[in-house]
Amino acid sequence: MKNPNPNTENFFERVYEIARQIPYGRVTSYGAIAKALGTARSARMVGWAMNASHNLEDVPAHRVVNRKGLLTGKHHFEGTNLMQQLLESEGIKVVDNQIIDFDKHFWEPEF
């Protein structure tokens, strides 16, 4: 069935365009992506887009976290700690679902 709201598909693709730009070893937040898109109050919608991206291998959803550096989307990844493992493989330390030195690893998107 086709999505009844084509604007959602377009929004999700714009989110993915930004997510694809997140550099290796860096992270950004749902809110930062929303702000870069000019829709600062749509961080939750960015989260929905990230949840829907797991069948897209070129979208590094593991690099998108909440505004405090918490791995709030980790339950959408296969395996118990896959999101954390992917981040740690890029040199980002995570303790108790929290990115250590979040400010150091944060990437501010521009669109």
Image: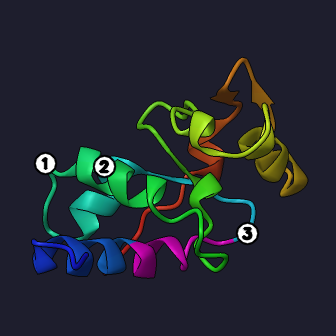
Q: Quadrant of residue 14?
A: bottom left
Q: In this picture, which residue range is highlighted in magenta?
A: 16-23
**What secondary structure is found at the residue carrying circle 1?**
loop
The one of 98 and 103 positioned closer to us in this rendering = 98
Q: Which residue is mark 2?
A: 31
Q: Is residue 8 visible?
A: yes
Q: Which residue is mark 1?
A: 41
Amino acid type for the residue under numbered disc 2? Gly
Q: Are marks 2 and 3 in contact (CB under 8 Å)?
A: no
Q: CA distance from mark 1 to mark 2?
A: 8 Å
**Label 1 vs 3, first from the N-terminus:** 3
Q: Which mark is residue 24?
A: 3
The percent coordinates of residue 57 (x first, y second) are 67, 76
Q: Quadrant of residue 10?
A: bottom left
Q: Quadrant of residue 44?
A: top left
**What secondary structure is found at the residue carrying circle 3?**
loop
* Residue at the image point whose x is 44% and y is 38% from the top: 66
* Residue at the image point whose x is 14% and y is 68% from the top: 38
Q: Are marks 1 and 3 in contact (CB under 8 Å)?
A: no
The percent coordinates of residue 37 (x first, y second) are 22, 71
